[in-house]
Image: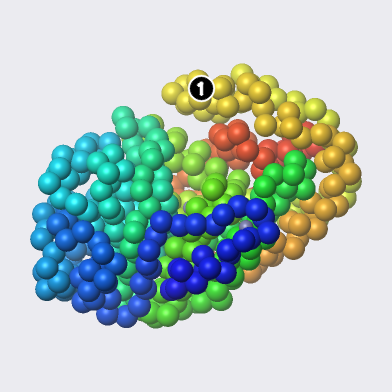
Amino acid sequence: MDIQKIVAELKNCPCGRAHTVDIRAVEIGSNMTSRTGEILEREGFPQNILLVADDNTLGVSEGILDSLNAHGFTMKKLIYSDLKLARAEQVAEIEALSADVDGILSVGTGSLNDICRAAARRVGREFAIFATAPSMDGFGSDTAPILRNNFKETWPGVQPSVIIADTGILARSPVELKAAGLGDMIAKYVAITDWRVSKILTGEYFCENIERLTLDAVNKCVSLAEKLPTEDEEAAGAVMEALVISGIAMKFAGCSRPASGAEHMVSHFLECYKCVNGIWPDYHGKKVGVASLLISNAYRRIVQTVEKVEAGVDPLDVDKLLSLFDPAFHDEIRALNTAPITDIVDPQALNERWQDIRQTVLHYIPEQSVLLAAMRAAGGITDIEGIHVSPELMRDALHGHAYMRHRIYLSRLLPMMGMDIMDFVQI
Ligand SMILES: [Zn+2]
Ligand SMILES: [Zn+2]
């Protein structure tokens, strides 16, 4: 994947923002394990490194240590037995081990990347990723979700300078993880729609080039969905590339708008609930995939059913809202909604631009049958039982998600139009 070419094509973008990245190289292809040392050396990655992995991820990356040794890298290693959650304790552990190294190489995906990304920022070291599964779009991110006392916090991190992925390893990764990657990608249809809705109503910044980059990536993934359960290297590589592109799109936009809409907030709600109750929150892309199916179906049904709206002032009742959340989150939710985001939405504008919004939803969100078929073909989870969520918890998530960030989502505007999202979903 030629990242410099993508950056060059977006030079002088009409949206007015400079689209830059810190990532120097992305290498996704066959037999990359044996080329890891050569690629990192070519990219000028420091030679004295801390390698962080777990038994699983290092086990599947056979040959990576030889490759690094052959190219003169000296390594300290931190190998976990099976790392599923990114906790503050692990960030501290990596920080302590990083004192006498110049770079951190994370061999793995998800939490293994997040703890390294956050630690690299705290100690001012370079960071690179050797990815072992295409399961979520956080590879290129410069922030990391880290658990502290069972609270998910967003920590600053560094973007990796180099991302390497061997398509053979990606293709042999569990179907559950590959399908989770597709789940995180179909979210982009909702994300782009929510972003466009906000642009229509509030004039929020928007970039059509970033939109095109994102949609091309997700469309390609959807077209290859049925090959994901097999060990097809092209399909696994395409999903990996799409996930990296989606991360880069966020960096280009300077916000998560191109990658995350109401569906990610539903997933975030579930994750917060599970973490604070000490429950394993499940893979990010798996939850996001199910939430994307629910929200995209609701959005299409809303605009197909409601031809005309008569919006009024947002009937927000903060105490009622708080009842949806664990007391641990009340201060945060109250602060986010003291001056609600709907203050910047003119009800009259919502009435007048409803036809624009309807067209946007129908244009950008594929029919439910298409998304369901893709997720099923990929071997992915498509219902709430599969993510261990009860109908009651999902109902609270659908009512509460849009209040967890100070941002416009179509779902956040429904109360202004006298609608309840539960009238448009089936769970
Ligand atoms: Zn732009
Ligand atoms: Zn995501």
In the depicted structure, whether residue 369 falls above or below residue 283 = below
Image location of residue 41, percent across then percent down: 22, 68
Q: Nearer the viewer, residue 82 or 420?
A: 82
- Amino acid type, callout 1: His
In the depicted structure, whether residue 247 falls above or below residue 100 = below
Which colour style is shown? rainbow
Q: Which residue is mark 1?
A: 330
Number of numbered callouts drawn: 1
Image location of residue 179, percent across then percent down: 44, 65
Image location of residue 75, percent across then percent down: 11, 58
Question: Element type at marker 1?
Answer: helix
Q: Is residue 69 left or right of residue 412?
A: left
Residue 240 in view (yes/no)? yes
Give the residue displayed 17% in from the left and 45% down from the top. Answer: 98
Q: Quadrant of residue 155?
A: top left
Image location of residue 322, percent across then percent down: 57, 23
Q: Nearer the viewer, residue 388 or 110?
A: 110
Q: Is residue 185 left or right of residue 84?
A: right
